[in-house]
Image (tube, rainbow, N blue to C red):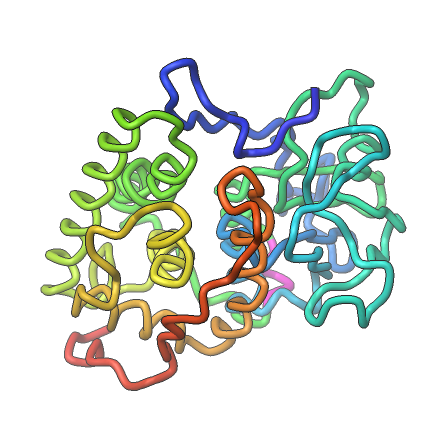
Amino acid sequence: MSRSSIEEVSESGAFARTPSKFRNFVSQDPNSPFPAESGRYHLYIAYGCPWACRCLSYLRIKGLDKVISFTVVKSKWENTKENDEHIGWVFPSSDDEEPGAEPDPINGAKTVRELYELASTSRDYNGKYSVPVLWDKKLNTIVNNESSEIIRMLNSEFNNLAENAALDLYPPHLQSKIDEVNEWIYEGINNGVYRCGFAKKQAPYNEAIEKLYKALDRCEEILSKQRYICGNTLTEADIRLFVTLIRFDEVYAVHFKCNKRLIREYPNLLNYTKDIFQIPDMSSTVNMDHIKRHYYGSHPSMDPFGIIPVGPNTDYSSPHDRSRFSS
């Protein structure tokens, strides 16, 4: 049975994300089955998806967009196969169908589902047809569809090809700290907003919302003392946190019922989000039109009319106060 993330709900009514299926690794080792090579790999992403935009952020700030090409799918989920109820990511039929999205230039696929079916060695593949997808153009298969692993590859394995190879978002002396922070931010915030939004019973929603705001309060306290979440150095943990924060007031507060307190009501979190947004090339990874159209238009059981709220339209390019900390 084909599934989308909104269907990942346990018997208790709690959202339970299933793991990614493709877990190969690109390596600097030339003898690797997937060696780091310019022009060999292609990234499929959606501006609406925070997990995919982690990878796009790395592609941009590491200076790898001339080494690894990428394609953006349409913002709204649509039916992926005739006589099948599954809805998911699809490609536009032309460059002008939706600004920011483009047809698949590698495989000519009409849907992301087709990529998974092309890459799957088993006809009964029953995983999600999710983005990001890191595609190997030489072997014509999916290398990896787990964002946390793809960003590690982009951070280190393509450094001999990267324009900004000196930027290390997972430096050895901070790795244990980054891993620890990633864990509670993922549980409470990154996945936490989905646990709030996709809960189908009150008790799991209450549990998720409490955990979410406990984690946000913890971030606010940490960021009152230092510029970034792991200290005064930009790291992987900041990118992972940013992709959720930038969507919070515009989408999660309304669509996922995360309305106890908004990010713009947290002085440190708000200024921190502006700071990350204003890193060179980061703003190009945020397409708020796609983000809003995706969430409000792709979950008909939650928003059957697909009405997109007009606000709040926070200006993340406005001045921030984070330069008060050394970096």
- Tell me which corner region of the image, top left, top right, bottom left or bottom right, holds residue 74: bottom right
x and y, in percent, of residue 190 in the image: 37, 44
Q: How many marks?
A: 0
Q: Residue at x 38, y 21 (%)?
A: 13
Horizontal and vertical percent position of residue 4 = 60, 33
Q: Locate residue 324 relative to residue 249 in the image: left or right.
A: left
* Magenta stretch: helix, strand or loop mostly: loop
Q: Position of residue 257 (x, y in %)?
A: 33, 46
Q: Is residue 228 left or right of residue 17?
A: left
Q: Residue at left 20%, top 80%? A: 321
> Residue drawn at (70%, 44%), measured in percent from left and top?
35
Q: For this rendering, which residue is in front, 221 or 28? A: 221
Q: Residue at x 11, y 64 (%)?
A: 224
Q: Nearer the viewer, residue 178 or 277?
A: 277
Residue 84 placement (x, y as % from top left): 78, 28
Q: Which residue extends farthest front?
A: 305
Q: Residue furthest top?
A: 11
Q: In this rendering, is residue 318 above or below 159?
A: below
Quarter holding the N terminus is top right
Q: Is residue 266 magenta?
A: no
Query: In the rendered image, which quarter is residue 221 located in?
Result: bottom left
Range shown magenta: 158-162
Taking depth in this image into account, of 85 and 211 the one nearest to the observer is 85
- In the image, is residue 159 part of the stretch drawn in magenta? yes
Residue 200 appears left or right of 204:
right
| Horizontal side of residue 213 vs 161, given as left or right | left
179 or 265, nearer to the observer: 265
Check the picture and name the quadrant holding the C terminus. bottom left
| Residue that protrudes farthest toward the right in the picture | 108
When the figure is inspected, residue 211 is found, relative to residue 270, above or below; the finding is above
Q: Quadrant of residue 222?
A: bottom left
